[in-house]
Image (cartoon, helix red, strand yellow):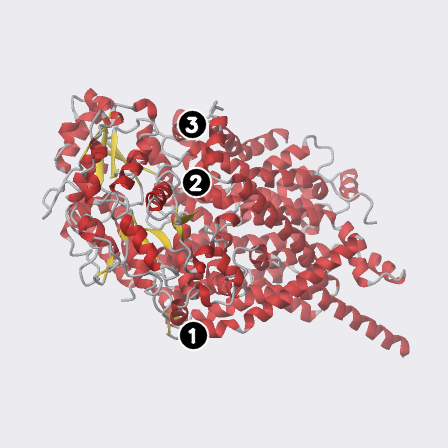
């Protein structure tokens, strides 16, 4: 009996192998010839019933359901659920199918689907990291829908934010969360050095280092920790003076970028003075300020969510803007790090519904933004910032109305150029800064970095 | 005469049976591995961004040798290969022969504990290793308290120590895994052989080299090829422990290929060309190992 | 010797201990490196249940891993047996060619493979998950290598007794090679259970998510709840550990009297 079963399984496996062979061998040539053409014809056309069930409900055209990919249940997924509720008030039949998909998976799936020419696996709407927007839209021009005429009023969004998702003058995304840079400090630690958060407001990096030395002397604690090999702080400093790693025409702007030189020197000065300590990983970075090993941090405002997990430190934190670069043209105390925007994919069957949904929620509802504020999702949509909810004091940060403050910061962030080759340039600069800190010469390192980026761009 | 022809047909019949037996597996590999591989090979002669590619001859293959990061990744990968694989296999062999001892107590528990690392999910393992080697991690704490270091050493931000941490992590994770093959291979050796050797007065070291190693040769070959392959395609540790850093000092070839495919502006033609270089490297090494180790007595 | 084993075991088990501790602590405590068990376990369980559909993910993972392991062992052992027992020049060459299949990084063949599976309509299906890894060069070679110690005289005896070739495989080879099967089963189950890149590409709806995907979900937020994460990781690790524990006697205790 057992044996019969086994041989049955065996036969099954063999016939599967055959089937697989038949199904595939004819397909390859045709597919690889015309990926672009395929990209135009979404789910409905493919002769694959199973594939359709994946992005499922949207295939049924008239249905009032949209599929969405995003990744944080407490944050952007929650925002989508709240948006669904807001939209359902006027459209009772409307439904969202939110699928939790980590950003890296979203990226892998976009790349796989668009490269293989089968967009039917994509959802109607997906959340995209702002830094990856240019890259994805330029690499896969057929995968996303132009939102310029979708009814979203882009003048309501902060210009610096919208710039991430504008490609060739077209609006390809609806901005979502705020990444305005904030400086967060443990006021109780600063106090031991005779300082307050005011000593860190509207200051330069030179003043920051001076203050940092005082804190170091009084408490033995550095002011800030940063993840080694990641250049978050470098990028924030750079943008605070409106500078980018690329020029308008897409060429690399590294060797002749004077601001970048100042940034690297500032970073090294921070590290050498002991005011900044480098840690190995993200977990260690978060751990360092939660456990009070450092006196604060500077990062995108979403870091506040991590800070607030240390419930016992409520009231001991204070928030202000970041230091400005010394000697750089256009230096400000404001910058941006991280953040994401919603994109509509070419697989969306009911683009009108998707447009209307986005225009009347994320680009049209103060109610939505009020509802998601407690989760830490700060708007980049100007009208939301005027809402009363944003003026409510936050006890964790010493009773300061931090939300309103951050919205104000975000309007002052200089816009810069992300560039299609953003990640390549970022990694190259990270290598440069690591070598520079370890004693290498700044000009050589920048030269190597620019060569690496040019190499990646095929030049 | 008739007898020999009968034997011929019998051996032909056996020959055919062999083919039938291996057909399902071989066909599956043909369609699930070789068909995609051929497509990837074709792609390696193309260039372009995303899905829009054009033929470019062998320029991808030329390009990779001008790519400083890729060359660095080859060096790193071979560093791991040369140091880690021999240590791991020898260590696994020693552990397996200790645990094969019938008189040993708590064998089951020891075996399970030593195997556990490779069952541990990558996420946990990465978080744990990073925290062990953190500036305020246990390793630094111990070394400073013992007076070996004056102040905490930042293991993951220095080139050599970052590579060594990766090797330690690999040893930790995969030694138990390889031990499993040796243990199972040892079961096919009559235990009485060991008892006989003991009666003849052979010590543990002699037994190990005279009996265990020769009889386990097929298994050792298997693990050697698998480890070579695994190391040349090393990905998880580079991504999760050091993220290739500091300054690409620990990045592996597969990690760089992944970056080119999914992190950077996708260039699948170039990534495919690099993948085929890995194929060639592994194939050459495996061929050498087969030459030395794959002999039927 | 015991001392040596104890040290090795301690080093091996330490991270697991850490994981257990972390699963019972608050996120902030985990990050600050607390190494003793806490009292936050039930809270973490509650959070995890509320946050992720663990039951569904476990069910999926078990389904995929078990089906894959059974079919894979059968197909691969049959092939390995075929390659070794009936070996000749041609088959050795084919074996060498098959080995090439594992030497290309998966990233390179991912896109063509995805194309094939999606054209066949197998996205989000069990068959889509298992098909590419049913037959692996690794398992085939493992069975081929161990078939080398399968005594030829037994086969001859069985043939004289009139047993067909396929029956020799099922009735003689399979039971004799119990230890190889047990080892292969452990490894295959583990690989299937932990496999991540492939499922994340072909599984696009929530209903087909696997355990490693759930773990990945937990690491992607702006705030990582380490207590909850480590609990999920613990749940994700246990099945492989249990499979190993149950099977180890089969592959490490030897075969009594099967081969003479």
Q: Nearer the viewer, residue C47 or B265?
A: C47
Which residue in the structure is indicated by mark 2? C218
Q: Nearer the viewer, residue B160 or A280?
A: A280
Q: What percent of the width, then of the height, locates residue A13?
A: 67, 61
Q: What percent of the width, then of the height, locates residue C17?
A: 52, 30
Q: Residue at x 64, y 58 (%)?
A: C141
Q: Mark 2 lies on which chain?
A: C
Give the label on residue C26, or none.
3
- Residue at mark 3 shares a chain with residue at mark 1: no
Q: Nearer the viewer, residue A178 or B68?
A: A178
Give the label on residue A33, or none.
1
Q: In this view, does B34 lie to the left or right of C248?
A: left
SS state under label 1? helix
Q: Which chain carries label 3?
A: C
In three-dimensional space, the C-alpha distance between marks 1 and 2, rounded to whole angstroms, equals 39 Å
Give the label on residue A21, or none.
none
Assign the C terminus of chain A to one quadrant of the image.
bottom left
Q: What percent of the width, then of the height, locates residue A337?
A: 25, 44
């Amino acid at each position: 009996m057992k044996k019969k079963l086994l041989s049955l399984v065996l036969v099954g496996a063999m016939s599967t192998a055959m089937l697989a062979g038949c199904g595939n061998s004819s397909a390859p040539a045709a597919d690889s010839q015309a990926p672009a053409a395929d990209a135009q014809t979404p789910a409905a056309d493919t002769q694959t019933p199973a594939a359709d069930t994946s992005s499922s409900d949207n295939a049924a055209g008239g249905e009032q359901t949209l599929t969405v990919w995003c990744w944080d249940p407490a944050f952007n997924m929650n925002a989508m659920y709240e948006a669904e509720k807001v939209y359902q008030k006027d459209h009772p039949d409307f439904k969202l199918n939110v699928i939790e998909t980590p950003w890296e998976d979203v990226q892998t799936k976009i790349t796989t689907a668009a490269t293989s020419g089968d967009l039917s696996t994509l959802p109607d709407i997906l959340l995209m990291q702002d830094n990856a927007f240019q890259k994805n839209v330029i690499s896969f021009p057929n995968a996303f829908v132009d939102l310029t005429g979708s009814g979203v009023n882009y003048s309501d969004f902060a210009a610096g934010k919208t710039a991430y998702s504008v490609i060739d003058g077209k609006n390809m995304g609806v901005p979502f969360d705020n990444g305005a840079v904030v400086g967060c400090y443990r006021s109780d630690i600063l106090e031991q050095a005779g300082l307050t958060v005011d000593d860190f407001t509207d200051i330069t990096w030179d003043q920051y280092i001076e203050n940092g030395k005082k804190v170091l002397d009084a408490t033995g604690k550095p002011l800030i920790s940063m993840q080694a090999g990641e250049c978050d702080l470098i990028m924030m400093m750079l943008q605070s003076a409106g500078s980018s790693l690329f020029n308008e025409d897409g060429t690399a702007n590294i060797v002749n970028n004077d601001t970048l030189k100042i940034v690297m020197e500032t970073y090294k000065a921070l590290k050498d003075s002991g005011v900044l300590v480098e840690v190995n990983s993200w977990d260690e970075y978060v751990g360092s300020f939660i456990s009070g090993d450092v006196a604060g941090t500077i990062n995108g405002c979403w870091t506040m969510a991590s800070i607030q997990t240390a419930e016992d430190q409520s009231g001991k934190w204070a928030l202000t803007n970041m230091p400005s670069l010394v000697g750089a043209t256009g230096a400000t105390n404001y910058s941006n790090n991280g953040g994401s925007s919603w994109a509509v994919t070419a697989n969306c069957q009911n683009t009108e519904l998707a447009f209307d949904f986005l225009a009347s929620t994320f680009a049209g509802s103060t109610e939505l933004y009020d509802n998601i504020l407690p989760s830490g999702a700060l708007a980049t949509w100007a009208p939301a910032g005027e809402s009363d909810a944003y003026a409510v004091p936050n006890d964790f940060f010493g009773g300061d109305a931090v939300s309103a403050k951050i919205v104000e910061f975000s309007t002052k962030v200089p816009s810069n150029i992300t560039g299609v080759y953003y990640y390549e340039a970022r990694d190259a600069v990270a290598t440069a800064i690591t070598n520079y800190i370890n004693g290498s010469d700044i000009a050589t390192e920048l030269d190597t970095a620019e060569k690496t980026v040019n190499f990646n761009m095929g030049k | 005469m008739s007898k020999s022809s009968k034997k011929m047909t019998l051996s032909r019949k056996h020959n055919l049976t062999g083919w039938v037996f291996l057909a399902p597996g071989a066909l599956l590999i043909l369609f699930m591995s070789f068909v995609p591989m051929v497509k990837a090979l074709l792609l390696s002669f193309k260039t372009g961004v995303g899905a829009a590619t054009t033929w470019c001859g062998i320029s991808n293959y030329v390009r990779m040798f001008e790519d400083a990061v890729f060359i660095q990744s080859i060096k790193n990968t071979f560093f791991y290969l040369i140091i880690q694989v021999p240590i791991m296999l020898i260590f696994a062999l020693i552990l397996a022969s200790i645990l094969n001892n019938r008189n040993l107590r708590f064998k089951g528990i020891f075996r399970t504990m030593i195997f556990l690392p490779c069952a541990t999910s990558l996420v946990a393992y990465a978080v744990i290793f990073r925290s062990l080697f953190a500036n305020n991690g246990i390793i630094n704490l111990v070394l400073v308290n013992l007076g070996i270091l004056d102040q905490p050493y930042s293991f993951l931000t220095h080139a050599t120590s970052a590579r060594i941490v990766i090797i330690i992590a690999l040893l930790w994770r995969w030694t138990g895994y390889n031990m499993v093959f040796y243990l199972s291979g040892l079961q096919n050796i009559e235990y009485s052989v060991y008892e006989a050797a003991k009666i003849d007065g052979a010590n543990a070291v002699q037994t190990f080299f005279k009996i265990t190693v020769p009889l386990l040769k097929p298994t050792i070959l298997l693990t050697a090829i698998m480890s070579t392959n695994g190391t040349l395609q090393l990905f998880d540790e580079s991504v999760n422990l050091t993220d290739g850093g500091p300054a690409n000092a620990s990045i592996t070839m597969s990690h760089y290929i992944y970056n080119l495919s999914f992190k950077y502006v996708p260039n699948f033609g170039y990534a495919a060309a690099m993948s085929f270089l890995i194929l060639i490297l592994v194939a050459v090494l495996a061929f050498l190992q087969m030459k030395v180790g794959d002999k039927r007595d | 010797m015991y001392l040596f084993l104890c040290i090795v075991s301690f080093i091996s088990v330490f991270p697991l201990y850490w994981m257990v501790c972390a699963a019972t602590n608050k996120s902030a405590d985990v990050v600050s490196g607390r190494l003793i068990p806490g009292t936050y376990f039930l809270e973490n369980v509650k959070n995890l249940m509320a946050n992720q559909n663990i039951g569904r993910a476990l069910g999926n993972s078990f389904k995929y891993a078990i089906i894959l392991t059974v079919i894979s062992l059968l197909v691969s052992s049959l092939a390995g047996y075929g390659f070794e027992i009936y070996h000749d020049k041609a088959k050795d060459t084919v074996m060498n060619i098959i080995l090439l299949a594992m030497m290309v990084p998966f990233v390179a063949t991912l896109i063509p493979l995805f194309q094939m599976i999606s054209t066949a309509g197998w996205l989000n299906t069990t068959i889509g998950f298992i098909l590419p890894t049913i037959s692996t060069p690794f398992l085939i070679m493992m069975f081929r290598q161990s078939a080398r110690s399968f005594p030829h005289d037994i086969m001859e005896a069985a043939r004289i007794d009139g047993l067909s070739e396929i029956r020799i495989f099922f009735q003689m080879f399979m039971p004799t090679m119990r230890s190889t099967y047990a080892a292969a089963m452990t490894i295959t189950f583990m690989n299937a259970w932990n496999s991540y890149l492939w499922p994340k590409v072909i599984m696009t709806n929530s209903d087909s998510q696997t355990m490693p995907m759930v773990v990945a979900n937990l690491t992607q937020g702006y705030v990582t709840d380490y207590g909850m994460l480590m609990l999920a990781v613990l749940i994700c690790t246990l099945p492989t550990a249990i499979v190993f524990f149950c099977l180890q006697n089969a592959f490490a205790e030897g075969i009594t009297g099967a081969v003479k």
